[in-house]
Amino acid sequence: LVSRKKKPENTIVELKGERIGDGKPHLVFGPCAVESYEQVATVANAVRAKGLKLLRGGAFKPRTSPYDFQGLGLEGLKILKRIGDEFDLAVISEIVSPADIEVAVDYLDVIQIGARNMQNFELLKAAGAVNKPILLKRGISATIEEFINAAEYIMAQGNGQIILCERGIRTYERATRNTLDISAVPILKKETHLPVLVDVTHSTGRRDLLLPTAKAALAIGADGVMAEVHPDPAVALSDNAQQMDLKQFDEFMNELRSFAFAR
Ligand code: PEP
Ligand code: MN
């Protein structure tokens, strides 16, 4: 069902007037984790000031260590819903449990399925059963074929509103947190009709690589870029090495816009 052979034209996921998959670049920003209303509102304000409409933030955080901040859970979803309403933004957040998918529908504009859950088939089926766009991230060690099959699981249940997200894969290379598989973008665009985003934050794990990888993503045909922005990354409860502060976000946007919209 996700194959371009079955459906030659691009699937477009429409969110607050942004049509992801229309051939133009769409940008998604927000903090790694929802920490408080004020924290998310500060980022939401910066996002709106740039004329952007898409905001992401984690409420259920799948952390590598059980002792790390696990997110605010439902409270985080409530904060996102309020921010979405007040700032007129589409809000995106990860759901980690099939039982929470139905609940999430009331709070979110897009349900994210994270890398660690790309092959959580019950979660994929639950996501396929709701009428809500799904942002599906590539598994940490997933092949492109496995990634496409995960999307197929969702679509097989009837939900065709899927955005794919390349977020880097595990290789022997340690200079970056993961290895951004940039060639996955044109392969996914060729093999499927779904929009493809590139998450430059989790693929690189390095603030200094966000801009060059974002440019590469758009140059190679991605439908957009996702990156993390936090009012004060130094005190962030997660991913403090790679989130941009507001000044860096401003510079990133100016540079990316002059690059991407010039072509
Ligand atoms: C995220 O986007 O918040 C996240 C945890 O990323 P990933 O699932 O790609 O590791
Ligand atoms: Mn993060």
Image: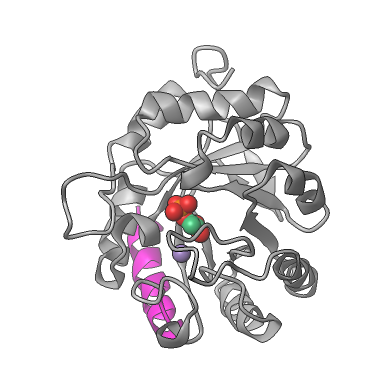
Residue 107 % position (x, y): 79, 58
Secondary structure that dominates the magenta span: helix
Residue drawn at point x = 78 percent, y = 75 percent: 86
Where 105 sits versus 72, above or below?
Answer: above
Residue 40 % position (x, y): 63, 78
Which image quadrant for residue 79?
bottom right
Where 165 sits versus 94, above or below?
Answer: above
- In this orientation, which residue lies closer to the viewer: 178 or 88? 178
User: Would residue 126 be found to the left or right of residue 70 on screen?
Assistant: right
Q: Which residues are magenta?
A: 244-263
Residue drawn at point x = 81 percent, y = 51 percent: 103
User: Would residue 240 be found to the left or right of residue 22 on screen?
Assistant: left
Residue 195 % position (x, y): 52, 38
Where 237 sits versus 224, above or below?
Answer: below
Residue drawn at point x = 52 percent, y = 29 percent: 150
Residue drawn at point x = 70 percent, y = 69 percent: 76
